[in-house]
Image (cartoon, rainbow, N blue to C red):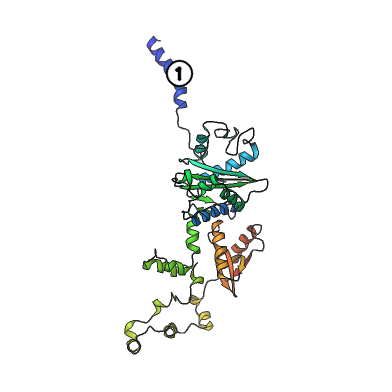
Amino acid sequence: MKPQFLIILLFLIALQPTMSAQKKKPEPTIPSSYCISARELELYQLINEYRQSQGLEIIPLSKSLCYVAYVHVRDLQKNRPDLSGCNLHSWSGKGSWTPCCYAKEPNRQECMFKKPQELTGYKGHAQEIILWENKPASPSSSLEQWKSLEPTNDILIKRGRWAQKNWQAMGVALFEGYTSVWFGEAADKETKLLACEGGRQISHNYLVDAQVQARPPAQAVKSPATNQPMDQAQTQASPKTTPGTQPSQKPVDKPQQPPKSESPPAKQENSQPRPSHDQQQTKPPPPTSETIAANPMLQTPVRYYLIVSSFKTLEQARREVAKLISNGYTDAKFIEKDGNYRISIYDFENMEDAKKEQQTLSEVFKGIWVMEK
């Protein structure tokens, strides 16, 4: 073999490990089994309610940052990297991440900022607040403690050194006595999360959607920002807001007014608007039970609702529906029946499916029952 060929061959063999090392690592993925619990959703909601009370916007929920928080609290519980002079922002060397003793290492900020990139496909930097209690973590207790401390409260409501931060994503996790919340500087490309209770997918913007759905119709119509006819039509057409419509609004009467050409004498005799009961007198009489029985097209389809609670007032029912939606039950609604407001989380076309789901959720909602309507 000629010497020059031998040199080239040896060079290529030596280059192979270097080329392999330069191959781009695959982007970390979040396990498909990961889900967010009802207590974690409660904490996320409480933080945003506090921010809104301070005139701040809702931060979208981040699946990636939730998973980072999920991993961290379990690493703290199992491996205790916070011991030996470290603190709760520390990470052990027993996982697929860079370990660090946050209190001692000069690059501790980088260790925190880059954890989302090490564990998920999230590209932005993120900041964590975290605490431990010698009892099971509580959403409300955790938030109250953070509010009472200036450094953590400043992060929550953008004060002090954090005043210029525009948080685009938030992740939360609770485990044993640990509570962790991450605030991200970039939006998360992951826009769907799996709720542990019920197994339903929820949107990263579900809290904004829940507040819109739970808003009373009167507020939706009178809002200064909704001065367009399409918003009024949406309010009237929404099945979730129909039970709360005030009688004075009469949203269904206007389309049923007779054409102007049919009643000119009435308009000439009285220039004032006609009372609503006069309008109702022009409607055809409602069909009788015999007419409905003879004509299946007039019969209302029966639905089977899974009822989890009941309230006496409309305001209580609205609050409970909003809470359920925030916990991932996006089909939650209230149904007025027999003077009470029954809270339904799902509804079905047949009793068999309703019974199956009732059995599945019997441990989550004690006393859940099926209502036919």
Residue at 60% across, 42% down: 73
x and y, in percent, of residue 28 in the image:
50, 38
x and y, in percent, of residue 240 in the image:
50, 67
State which quadrant residue 356 falls in: bottom right
**Quarter of the image that includes the C terminus:** bottom right
State which quadrant residue 32 falls in: top right
Question: In the depicted view, which residue is nearer to us: 278 or 192?
Answer: 278
x and y, in percent, of residue 164 in the image:
43, 45
Vertical relation: 93 (above or below) 322: above
State which quadrant residue 329 falls in: bottom right
Residue 280 shown left or right of residue 132 in the figure: left
Residue at 49% across, 64% down: 215
**In this orientation, does residue 5 appear?**
yes
**Number of numbered discs:** 1
Circle 1 packing at 10 Å, graded few (<14), some (14-19), many (20+), is few
Q: What element carries label 1?
A: helix
**In this orientation, does residue 346 appear?**
no
Vertical relation: 168 (above or below) 335: above
**Quarter of the image that includes the N terminus:** top left
Residue type (three-letter) at the residue carrying disc 1: Ala
x and y, in percent, of residue 59 in the image:
48, 51
The residue carrying mark 1 is 14
Residue at 53% across, 83% down: 290
- Residue extending farthest to the right is 134
Residue 142 shown left or right of residue 239 in the figure: right
